[in-house]
Amino acid sequence: MKAWASLLGIIAMAFVVASQASTLTPVIDSFTLTDLVVDDSVKVLEIRSDENAYLKQHIPGSVHLSYDEFRGPKTNPGQLPDLRKLAKALGSRGIQVEDAVVIVHDGVTTTDFGAAARVYWTLKSVGFESLAILNGGFRAYQKDGFELASGQAKVLPVSTTLVLSPTWYADTAEVAKQVAGDGNARLLDARLDDFYAGTAWHDAAARPGILPGADQFAFEAFFDKNTPLLKHADDIDAIVSANGLNQPGTISYCNTGHWAATNWFVLSEVARVDGVKLYAESMVEWSALNQPMENVPTSVQFAILKTKKWFNSLVN
């Protein structure tokens, strides 16, 4: 009888943990994360930029994996990573597709959230079903005064297989069809005004400019003013509605699929707009392939812009 009672207790506990993981919302705060960590119902993945800082202080039980592991080469940073290498990196940290995972970024700037959103998009695209981003990242967790750990977390390595689903991914060929008029998707530029105007560009891009016919909605509008905190879901819904961003089938892009990942995340995961996709490689790949673009400066204007950019790099 006691054995049966113990077994039922274990089953009940497992059910509670599984239920918590299955109901993981896309954005959580530090208080929710702490409860999940105590219940041992999630894996915490810190993608902070400084691994040494992670080793000095991190969320108890979390593992560290560099954001670079989810990115392409310097010549095309938005390119998808080698899935076998990524699977090995995740497995070495005890993470497999069946796990519920909370992604933790630095939490210093709004751009940091973009890293977490890109990782979220990547993991979702390769089979992870229960994911969340810690709003405010590690900085928010630290400010909230929760317990911190140090050193390398002990994990049991696992083996996992990653398979890319194209559900949330628009590649260059698909974007080219849209530009050619063979589709009805909305192209949405997530970049700031100077990029959209063609006066700024990523260092790896061949030239400034936008996708022909693209609209713009800068990613920063989804954050509380002067903070890296994503706005409340109700506020986001209001922004999406007021700006007509609830168009199904939207393709989000930027320079390298980083800022655009924030717009994809907000529209797809928070506002629940149907069929939103991320053009992961974005303008760096598009411009390198000499595809048609708008808001492109003349050769003389581009030469002047490059000179200004070079001079500013010396001064700053």
Image (tube, rainbow, N blue to C red):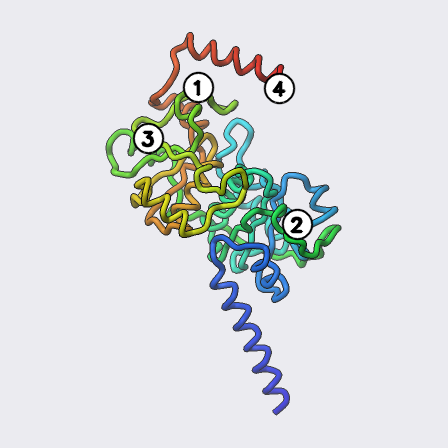
Residue type at tag 3: Ala
Q: Is residue 29 above or below residue 22?
A: above
Q: Quadrant of the N terminus?
A: bottom right
Residue density around tag 3, few if under 14, some if 14–19, many if 20 or more, within 10 Å: some
Q: Residue at x 58, y 41 (%)?
A: 67
Label 3 – label 4 distance at C-alpha: 32 Å
Residue 69 x %, y %: 58, 41
Residue density around tag 2, few if under 14, some if 14–19, many if 20 or more, within 10 Å: some
Contact? badges 1 and 3 (CB < 8 Å): no
From the image, tell me which residue sits under label 4. 316
Label 3 – label 2 distance at C-alpha: 39 Å
Answer with mark 2 or mark 4, whichever residue precedes in sequence: 2
Label 2 – label 4 distance at C-alpha: 30 Å
Label 1 – label 4 distance at C-alpha: 18 Å
Answer with mark 1 or mark 3, whichever residue precedes in sequence: 1
What's the mark number on residue 142?
Answer: 2
Residue 228 x %, y %: 54, 42
Of residue 287 and residue 198, the one placed in the foreground of this image is: 198
From the image, tell me which residue sits under label 3. 214
Of residue 171 and residue 43, the one placed in the foreground of this image is: 43
Residue 92 can be seen, yes or no: no
From the image, tell me which residue sits under label 1. 199
Query: Which of the 4 image quadrants contains residue 70?
Result: top right
The residue most toward the front is: 225
Answer with mark 1 or mark 2, whichever residue precedes in sequence: 2
Q: Is residue 181 above or below residue 105?
A: above
Q: Nearer the viewer, mark 3 or mark 4?
A: 4
